[in-house]
Image (cartoon, rainbow, N blue to C red):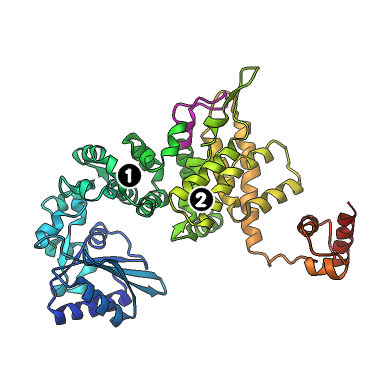
């Protein structure tokens, strides 16, 4: 069922197209998803191919629906119209035929399942919500219907990946999102044309990678990408982890452990669905956009991939024979920063990614104690900030992926006994009234006659920690503690 507001906008476009006598077809993902019965979200995307005049039609449509017009490629006649709704953003992409006619245009598309094309100008819009009507009326690649039924990803033509090497990555993002398998001849051609991926812009690569990471089946897709050489083509830094042996706590080398950590993270999130209240909090937390349309879920899986990337540079054989990786979290943070810049992540995303990698050992350190002190817990939550839950669950996934002879069931259980209450405490605090400091910098100037300077941050930090821990309960006590800090 298509929402009324979407149908209204499509009706506007249909009238415009008829008035201009434009030959226009609705193609690609929207039709594919309707045939597959996938839910239609508020962020629906529509792709239209037009015999000619796509830019003029897009401008007229943007004006009619009060949407934003974005020129994508003047030479290829590509434009986008975006319209914000209460449920999200509707995106309408327009492009001139890529060939002399529709059949040629469809041959130039990526995969057979994306070649469904409906004569939009003469379509019954109400029928767009049902797969039967679409399959009956749509033109498509000869194998499209069969491949949709068999859940197969097949290239639309031999030149698919030469025409646009990003389609190699798109095959995996579709595999992750739809649960389809890549047909053998297509996979063979992807491997052959893989060098072309180097010439694709980082922004386009990042978006397809994040679609994989945001999916529920990222772990298996990442393994498939690794097997084909695609994953390290996207993030070359990952190569250093391959074959690096670890100590007695581990049963896998660093790279295999890394891939297993992603799998364990997904299993962990799935297992926590049995607690409805916690599941709701986790869904909101991981669905949240960090920046650039990217969810925290995708970012923490990238952190899973990078959490031990500092180990190869810090691996050391100790005199007693054990293997150590002291400081690998610091090295890992630096490499994560490089990867983040390489993928052109926003500053906010990079900082969050670096924090996850840097702090992934901290929950394990807390579990070294039978009961960590309130001060240690407070400092962890303060330093981890909004990424505290990400760090805690990453650390648990890391633990679950560590099953060497020195790892015991007690270690795992105790790690859980520390981590899960902290996850719940994080969400409980988010629902409390905002924390209000007893004193601030103005009080230090006014009450203690101090001159502003670098020492202020340390004084206020100490007072705030004491207030959080219940050691300071009034403004007067806060000022007294500040005086003592000044005397140190």
Q: Is residue 248 magenta?
A: yes
The N terminus - image quarter? bottom left
Q: Position of residue 101 (x, y in %)?
A: 9, 63
Nearer to me, 423 or 24: 24
- Residue at x-position 12% and y-position 72%: 23
- Structural distance between the alpha carbons of marks 2 and 1: 43 Å
**Magenta-tinted stretch:** 242-258
Q: Is residue 86 above or below residue 102?
A: below
* Circle number at residue 258: none
Is residue 404 in view? yes
- Closer to the observer: label 2 or label 1? 1
Q: Position of residue 126 (x, y in %)?
A: 22, 73
Q: Position of residue 149 (x, y in %)?
A: 20, 50
The residue beneath circle 2 is 274
Q: Quadrant of residue 363?
A: top right
- Residue at x-position 45% and y-position 57%: 294
CB atoms at circles 2 and 1 under 8 Å apart?
Answer: no
The residue beneath circle 1 is 198
Q: Position of residue 447 (x, y in %)?
A: 88, 69
Q: Quadrant of residue 129?
A: bottom left
Q: Is residue 414 above or below residue 288?
A: above
Nearer to me, 266 or 380: 380
Q: Residues within 10 Å of mark 2 (few under 14, many from 20)?
A: few
Dominant SS type (magenta): loop
């Amino acid at each position: 069922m298509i929402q009324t507001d979407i149908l209204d906008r499509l009706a506007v476009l249909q009238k415009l197209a008829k008035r201009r006598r434009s030959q226009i077809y609705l193609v690609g993902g929207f039709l594919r998803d309707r045939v597959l019965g996938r839910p239609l979200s508020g962020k629906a995307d529509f792709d239209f191919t037009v015999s000619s005049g796509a830019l003029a039609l897009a401008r007229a449509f943007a004006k009619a629906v009060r949407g934003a017009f974005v020129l994508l490629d003047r030479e290829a006649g590509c434009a986008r119209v975006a319209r914000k709704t209460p449920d999200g953003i509707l995106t309408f992409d327009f492009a001139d035929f890529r060939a002399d006619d529709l059949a040629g245009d469809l041959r130039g598309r990526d995969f057979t399942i994306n070649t469904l094309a409906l004569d939009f100008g003469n379509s019954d819009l109400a029928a767009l919500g049902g797969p039967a009507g679409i399959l009956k009326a749509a033109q498509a690649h000869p194998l499209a219907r069969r491949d949709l039924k068999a859940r197969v990803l097949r290239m639309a033509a031999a030149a698919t990946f030469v025409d646009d090497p990003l389609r190699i990555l798109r095959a995996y993002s579709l595999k992750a999102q739809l649960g389809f398998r890549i047909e053998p001849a297509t996979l063979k051609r992807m491997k052959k044309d893989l060098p072309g991926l180097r010439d694709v812009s980082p922004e386009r690569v990042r978006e397809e990678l994040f679609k994989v990471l945001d999916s529920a089946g990222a772990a298996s897709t990442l393994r498939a990408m690794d097997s084909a050489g695609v994953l390290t083509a996207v993030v070359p830094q990952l190569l250093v982890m391959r074959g690096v042996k670890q100590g007695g706590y581990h049963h896998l080398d660093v790279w295999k452990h890394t891939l297993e950590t992603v799998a364990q993270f997904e299993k962990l999130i799935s297992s926590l669905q049995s607690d409805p209240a916690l599941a709701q909090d986790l869904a909101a937390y991981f669905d949240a956009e960090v920046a650039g349309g990217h969810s925290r879920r995708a970012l923490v899986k990238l952190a899973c991939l990078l959490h031990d990337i500092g180990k190869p540079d810090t691996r050391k054989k100790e005199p007693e024979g054990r293997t150590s990786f002291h400081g690998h979290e610091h090295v890992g943070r630096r490499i994560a920063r490089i990867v983040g810049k390489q993928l052109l992540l926003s500053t906010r995303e990079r900082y969050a990614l670096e924090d996850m990698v840097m702090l992934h050992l901290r929950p394990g350190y807390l579990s070294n104690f039978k009961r960590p002190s309130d001060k240690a817990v407070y400092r962890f939550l303060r330093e981890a900030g909004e990424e505290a839950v990400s760090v805690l669950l990453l650390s648990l996934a890391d633990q679950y992926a560590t099953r060497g002879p020195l790892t015991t069931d007690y270690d795992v259980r105790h790690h859980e006994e520390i981590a899960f209450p902290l996850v719940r405490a994080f969400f409980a605090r988010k629902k409390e009234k905002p924390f209000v400091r007893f004193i601030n910098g103005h009080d230090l100037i006014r009450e203690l006659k101090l001159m502003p300077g670098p020492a202020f941050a340390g004084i206020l930090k100490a007072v705030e920690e004491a207030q959080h821990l219940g050691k300071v309960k009034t403004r007067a006590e806060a000022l007294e503690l500040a005086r003592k800090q000044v005397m140190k």
